[in-house]
Image (cartoon, rainbow, N blue to C red):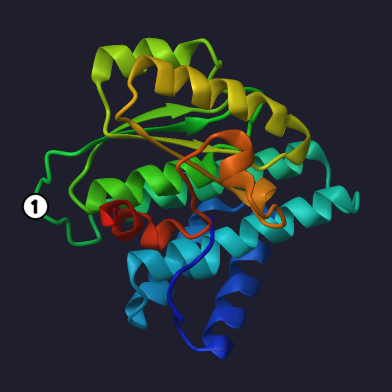
Amino acid sequence: MAASTPGPPPIERGEALDGLLGALQAADQLRAMTVVRQAMKRGWTADDVRFHLITPALHEIGARWQRKEIGVGDEHVATSICEWLLFALTGRARRRPATGLRALVGCSEGELHSLGARIVAHVLSEQGWSVLFLGATTPTSAWPQIVRARRPDVAVLTTTTPTILEEVGPALHAIKASRPECRTVVGGQAYLDLEGAAADLGADLVALEAGTLARQLQEP
């Protein structure tokens, strides 16, 4: 999911992104953390780091893998470092008072890229939601079970890989059958060029910007 604010100046973003990509390519976790700390010393917020540094870095790493410039092992290491950076950001953003709202956040079945879902979970938690994070490739059969047990107000399914979108619709229908009042949200790179995806898949909302999701969920 993408950013929702203009963020830091483009020159700063470019410098920070180059620094982070260099650290990821070198598999240097401490150097990557130094890039993040330097950005925050310049006044970057946790969301700035998430949406204007970590997210574009991951997109570039994925593109390099697709171009066969790096191997799958390199991609996995970079992803692991970025996950560590996301955890390091927790506690740095001001948390709003608890809303009493509950959310389930996970990936559709077959989706192994879970950092987008993790970002959503962190953002909603900071907005006062109680969040359960289900992780990568959550089986379709698992969604109705946990929806019945945890009674969430919202279930968010993220999908990055377009070829597995066919798994999303059955999961959404299973969620609604288990708890009709639970709002269903889909998001991720797989939806970027899909008009009418919500209606086609049976979702209540398609969210492409994690930073505005909490506000969108407050709308009728």
Q: Is residue 34 visible?
A: no
Residue at 58 percent across and 89 percent down: it is: 11
Q: Residue furthest left?
A: 97
- Provide the secondary structure element on which disc 1 rests: loop
Residue 116 as seen in the image, left or right of residue 161: left
Hey, what amino acid is under mark 1?
A: Pro
Residue 34 horizontal/vertical position (percent): 46, 65
103 sits left or right of 145 in the view: left
Residue 155 visible, this orientation: yes
Count of marks placed on residues: 1
Q: Which residue is mark 1?
A: 97
Name which residue lies at 38% across and 10% down.
145
Pick the residue in front: 8 or 123.
123
* Percent of width and height locating residue 18: 65, 73
Q: Tag 1: Cα neighbours inside 10 Å, few (<14), some, or many (≥20)? A: few
What residue sits 63% from the left and 61% below the top? 57
Note whether 104 is above or below 61 in the view shown. Answer: above
Q: Residue at x 62, y 64 (%)?
A: 56
Rendered position, 172 above or below 122:
above
Q: Position of residue 174 (x, y in %)?
A: 48, 17
Residue 89 sits in which quadrant?
bottom left
